[in-house]
Amino acid sequence: MDSKIMDVLKDRVLELGPAPDTSGAYRHFKLTRDADGIAWLLFDRADASANTLSAVVLEEFDQVLNALEAQRPTGIVVRSAKSSGFIAGADVNEFRGASDPSEVETQISRAHAVIDRFEALKIPTVAVIHGFCLGGGLEVALACQMRIAIDGARFGFPEVMLGLHPGLGGTARFTHLVNPMQAMPLMLTGKTIDARKAKAIGLVDAVTEERHVRNAVRDAVFGKLKRAKPSALIPIMNFSPVRGILASRMVAEAGKAAPREHYPAPYALIELWEKHGGDRAAMLNAEKASFARLMVTPTAQNLIRVFFLREQMKKLAGDGNTIKHIHVIGAGAMGGDIAAWCAHQDIRVTLADMKPAPIAGAMKRAADLYSKIIRKRTDQRDTLDRLIPDMDGEGVRNADLIIEAVSEKLELKQKVYAGIEPRMKPDAILATNTSSIPLQDLRSTLARPERLLGLHFFNPVSRLQLVEVVSHDGVDAEMLRKATAFAGAIDRLPLSVRSSPGFLVNRALTPYMLEAMMLMEEKVDKETIDAAAEQFGMPMGPIELADQVGLDICLAVGDMLRSKFGDLLPPTPAWLREKVNKGELGKKTGKGFYTWRDGKAEKSSSAVATARPTQEMIDRLVLPMSNVCVACLREGIVDNPDVVDGAMIFGTGYAPFRGGPLNYARTRGTENITATLRTLAARFGDRFAPDAGWETFK
Amino acid sequence: MSSGQQADGKPFMTRPVYIVDGSRTPFIKARSGPGPFTPVDLAVQCGRPLLARQPFAPNAFDQVILGCVNVIADEMNPARVAALRLGMGEAMVAFTVQINCGSGMQSIDTGYRYIREGNADLILAGGAEALSHAPLVWPQNGVRWFAGLAMAKGVLGKVAAIAKARPAYFKPIIGLERGLTDPITDLNMGQTAEKVGHLFGITRAQADAYAVESHTRLAHAQEQGWLKGEVETAFDRKGNFYDHDDGVRADSSVDKLATLKPVFERPWGQVTAGNSSQITDGASWTILASEDAVAKHGLTPKAVIIDSQWSALDPSIMGLGPVLSSNDLLKRNNMTIQDIETWELNEAFATQVLGCLAAWKDEKFCREVLGLDGAAGEIDRTRLNVDGGAISLGHPVGTSGNRIVLHLVNAMKRLGTKRGIATECIGGGLGGAMLIETV
């Protein structure tokens, strides 16, 4: 809840022990002692809103340890002075561009030495953890003797998302504190857990509130804290023959999610544990070399690049969001899910539709989503309360932003605009979620066309982070800025695009799906086509994706793009149109190319087993995407190749370890790409002709 | 602005108080088990669209007052819970009022007095009730047994405490049944209706005919779209929506109702499930505004509250409450029942409504009880409950008083009438009445 009173008192929330001296000896730490002789070591990284670990920080930590050893306190509390949380992880900047494993190993060994020294202190140490405690941050906490979590804290090892595994002793310390059958999956998936779960698995000793931190710390230091009892299973699970069996099971499990050739990190982690799980010290030591080996793989370096692409896009969003109330028109799949997501992000949302049934469906989907992503029932309730069904469209008058998500029909949209424009606040923004109608056409009937822009979300909204922010030549620059900041404020990543058919993502993705249909016409079975894309590293093949997007939408976008780009696209097959007419639209109707059951496509297991996709198949599917991205850059629809890669990854799930379609082209060599495209063009037609933009592409 | 007199004769400000808007949920008939919404859920469901259509922000109100009789354990002071859930801000003062079946009108009456006397400008006043959520209550002797068990020390002590259990301790009572029984006379509300019917000679056939008309009037109003803007569609978490008062039976007939057995006094009673109000869930809100608030936010008043009145009588004939409170109200304003063009008289029981109408025509009653010179006369059926009432759409106890004021305003606007009274009988022997004029 917004509270003016708590705003005034917010500096008092964190219990940081005695007030620190302003002229402390350290840049990133503050060190005080309380009346009981307990040292309060506050991590407060200079010039940053969140704490991260870097070589410099760890060096200073080493100096702090000198001071603590020189004048031994009765106990040490380690906690963060940042309201954002404990420690968000390592400073990923230091991982960028690593190419020499031995250099990485030397650096990580230095960091290990500091943490090992801290762990070896013969003084009670307590980590007090609020907010995010991730990666390297969790590894610091694990080196403490005791851990006290503040309710709301979240714990996890996201290293695997960067193609790595924990590298600051976490693999060994975690698997020896917590049952490896619970510890390993957390490190293998990168999932985070909350404070209660952390207590349940024995990661933290207590969960409390800020107001009890002083008493909790005192109990911890003086041996009165009831400790988490390590599971009796830990030694059994870490016993060599058992490890072997469990490890092979983990490998099988990992294989389902991420193939070894694309994602080596999970396999390296399993191997590390299988070999050294029985010996904590050996595992600590072996972790360094394994971590260093992973760091220099193309997968890790590409994923690290993706991490920074995300940061870059977040920055492009800018801050200072002024939009507090949005009005969504059309409670269909997209409108309803956009509304639900925004309500989840603390925005007041009115959701308008002419009929109650679509709103009811949207409310159900929202309730289902919230029950999965929001833990507390009161928070679920409050989120649902913010999502306001609006049968009479009354929300328009107070909304800061209107998002129109009605059917893709020009006249219908213009009719909707005519109804709402007179009732909008003067400074309200009118955004369309259109994927196929040019804004130049949509704006033609508006009294104030400068207020129109596009906010193009992707399905499923809660999972795909990209939002295309679409401009046209008459748009109000300030409104565009506000809409972009809004996208950032709802935890989505904005991509600025000029209004042009298909914008970036659909224009690049449509040839991929239509080419897949061409392959079907050539009697390649659909499981093989999907396997080709998955072999390249796509999370989902194009046939399955088409079903998920909806065949009606694929057809509409395909027709629209072909009317503009003609034979630069594969033709839309006649049988696709028949399927759409029959109402076989894909996942949403339960049948498209596949039959869908419980949200999953039913693939023939024999077809999957015998699928032998060729390199040519893969090239036919993925190279046109790179080709279109280059064309969009050349045409000035987008202006930054890095952000194009980010958009394709965050908007379509394009194989992240490839670093995006442009990075892939760069890595494979643009000569090779254009030559391959020319070969394909000679065999299959001009749609593969390399774009002129390749000549200047770097 | 003018001045009036307090009870002790001191003057106070009297400012006009306007009803500017209002909305309610559909009344949802209690079927098997708890319905989809709690009292506060219901208040939020109809409060959100109401607030969304206002030209001012939700935190612009001075306070929130909500009537609710059966407050559930998770929602103590439901007014405040609703205010916060409606996004009205941490500083929103909110309290809950309870005068049994008059609670929803008591919230309006309280808000009216705050504004009239210059203590507030904009008040959200409502009623909320989820009768389907009424709890099961354990018998007192069972509760005592359980407390003894909890206190017992040691294994032997526990065993001894357990041994004292008697089967009757575990027979839960439906809380609603107790709530609808008058504690002084130990008569169920239906029994008080039987008594009123008897005293004024109301027949079963008359009661059933009245009930049928309630249904046909509501069905007609729904069909004509007359409830649009008043009834807001409610949406639950499971993908269902509720867009109309679902207790209505457009095909109700005297023949069908005649087959029903009496429910309160078998075998000879005449109050049946068919000619009584229904057990339902629902909530309702009205927005009250001073002249200043109307000017400040550019509001359009629909009606002005002229006066209000609570009166009391023997609980065993509580059904006559409307006659007493309306009579006091009319006298104070130098009016007679003929001056009132539109009436909302809450349909707790057909027998009870007909008893009230008969009382007004009863010379002895009017002379000796109401202090009139003779019979007050006839209230024409065309002026009374024009779009049905609690018999067809249900009687969520704490909500009904609010609904009849809200609907009276809307019905008068549609009919083009000027002066109306909303009035209800109140379990425990009270009557409430509110006099309003359209603007």
Image: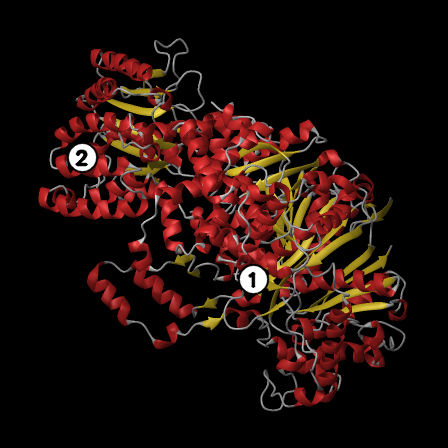
Left/right placement of residue A132 relative to residue A629 reads left
* Whole-percent x, y for residue A383 in the image: 53, 47
Q: Which residue is mark 2?
A: A272
> In this orientation, which residue lies closer to the viewer: B305 or A599?
A599
> In this orientation, which residue lies closer to the viewer: A164 or B364?
A164
Left/right placement of residue A677 relative to residue B116 reads left
Q: Amino acid at mark 1?
A: Glu
Q: Which residue is mark 1?
A: A578
Q: If you read the primary sequence from the N terminus, does the residue marked by circle 1 or circle 2 appear first?
A: 2
Residue A307 in view (yes/no): no
Q: Which residue occupies 65% across, 31% down?
A: A480
Q: Give residue B336's mark.
A: none
Residue B423 in view (yes/no): yes
* Whole-percent x, y for residue A24 in the image: 37, 10
Q: Which residue occupies 80% across, 74% down?
A: B369
Q: Amino acid at mark 2?
A: Leu
- Chain bearing tag 2 is A
